Image (spheres, grey):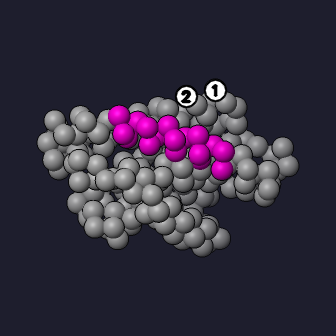
C-alpha cells in the first residue's frame, strides 16, 4: 500500500504538472479571497471548497491536495488571517486528499459519499482549529457556516468539473476518476 501511494505521488508530481499546480493554486487563492464573509471567531466563509472539490475530481488526491491546501492558506496569509494559514493548509489539503482517495469512479453516489466524508473532516478540522484559536464555544457556532460552505463548494465544484471535462476532455487524464477522454 505504501509503495502504491509513493508511486501515485511520483506519477502525479512530474515536471509538466508544476505549472498546472502554480496556476490552479493562484486561481484557488483568488477565488477564496473573492467572496469573504467574516465570522465571529475571526475567520471567514468563502468559496474555497468549490476549487477544493474541483481539484480533487480533476487532478486526484496528490496534485489536488497541493492546490487545495496551498491556495486557501495563501489566501489566509494575504487577507490578514495568518493565524489560520497552517490550519487551513492541513485541513483543506487533507480534504482534497480524502476526496481524491475516496472518489474513484465518476458516479453521483461515489462523489456524494466521498465528498461529504471529506467535508465532515473539514468541518471537524475547523472546529478543532477554531477551538484552539478562539475557544470551543465560539467554534461550535461556526459548524453551521462551515457545513454550508462545504455543501455549496461540493455543488459548485461538481458543476465546474462537469462543465470543464465536457469542454476540455484531456482534463480527465489528469485525475483518478477512471474516465476515458470524451466520455
Q: Of 134 and 40, which appears nearest the observer?
A: 40
Q: Residue furthest right?
A: 182
- Report helix, strand or loop for mark 2: helix
- Asked whether residue 17 is drawn in magenta, I would say no
Q: Give the vertical position of 105 relative to 17 (above or below).
A: above
C-alpha span from label 2 to label 1: 6 Å
- Asked whether residue 157 is drawn in magenta, I would say yes
Q: Of 7 and 28, which appears nearest the observer?
A: 28
Which residue is rendered at x = 79% and y = 50% of the image?
Answer: 166
On the question of residue 163 being in view, the answer is: yes
Q: Which of the 4 image quarters holds residue 156?
A: top right
Q: Which mark is residue 113?
A: 2
Q: Position of residue 143 (x, y in %)?
A: 32, 35
Q: Give the vertical position of 108 relative to 145 (above or below).
A: above
- Report helix, strand or loop for mark 1: helix
Q: Which mark is residue 109?
A: 1
Q: Position of residue 181 (x, y in %)?
A: 82, 50
Instruction: Find the magenta span and give its range.
Output: 144-160
Q: Residues within 10 Å of mark 2 (few under 14, many from 20)?
A: some
Q: Residues within 10 Å of mark 1 (few under 14, many from 20)?
A: few
Q: Position of residue 133 (x, y in %)?
A: 17, 50
Where's the C terminus, which quadrant? top right
Which residue is rendered at x = 64% and y = 37% of the image?
Answer: 104
Q: How many marks?
A: 2
Q: Which of the 4 image quarters holds residue 85?
A: bottom left
Q: Which mark is residue 160?
A: none
Which residue is rendered at x = 59% and y = 47% of the image?
Answer: 157
Labels 2 and 1 touching (C-beta < 8 A): yes
Q: Position of residue 18 (x, y in %)?
A: 57, 70
Q: Main secondary structure of the magenta part?
A: helix
Amino acid at each position: 500500500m505504501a509503495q502504491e501511494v509513493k508511486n501515485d505521488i511520483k506519477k502525479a508530481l512530474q515536471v509538466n504538472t508544476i505549472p498546472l499546480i502554480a496556476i490552479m493554486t493562484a486561481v484557488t487563492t483568488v477565488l477564496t479571497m473573492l467572496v469573504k464573509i467574516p465570522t465571529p471567531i475571526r475567520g471567514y466563509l468563502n468559496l474555497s471548497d468549490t476549487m477544493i472539490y474541483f481539484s480533487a475530481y480533476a487532478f486526484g488526491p496528490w496534485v489536488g491536495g497541493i492546490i487545495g491546501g496551498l491556495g486557501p492558506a495563501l489566501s489566509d496569509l494575504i487577507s490578514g488571517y495568518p493565524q489560520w494559514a497552517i490550519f487551513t493548509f492541513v485541513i483543506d489539503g487533507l480534504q482534497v486528499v480524502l476526496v481524491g482517495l475516496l472518489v474513484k469512479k465518476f458516479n453521483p453516489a461515489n462523489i456524494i459519499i466521498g465528498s461529504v466524508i471529506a467535508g465532515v473532516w473539514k468541518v471537524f478540522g475547523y472546529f478543532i482549529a477554531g477551538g484552539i484559536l478562539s475557544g470551543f464555544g465560539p467554534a461550535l457556532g461556526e459548524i453551521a457556516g462551515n457545513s454550508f460552505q462545504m455543501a455549496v463548494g461540493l455543488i459548485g465544484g461538481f458543476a465546474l468539473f462537469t462543465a470543464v471535462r465536457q469542454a476540455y476532455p484531456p482534463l480527465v487524464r489528469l485525475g483518478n476518476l477512471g474516465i476515458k477522454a470524451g466520455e
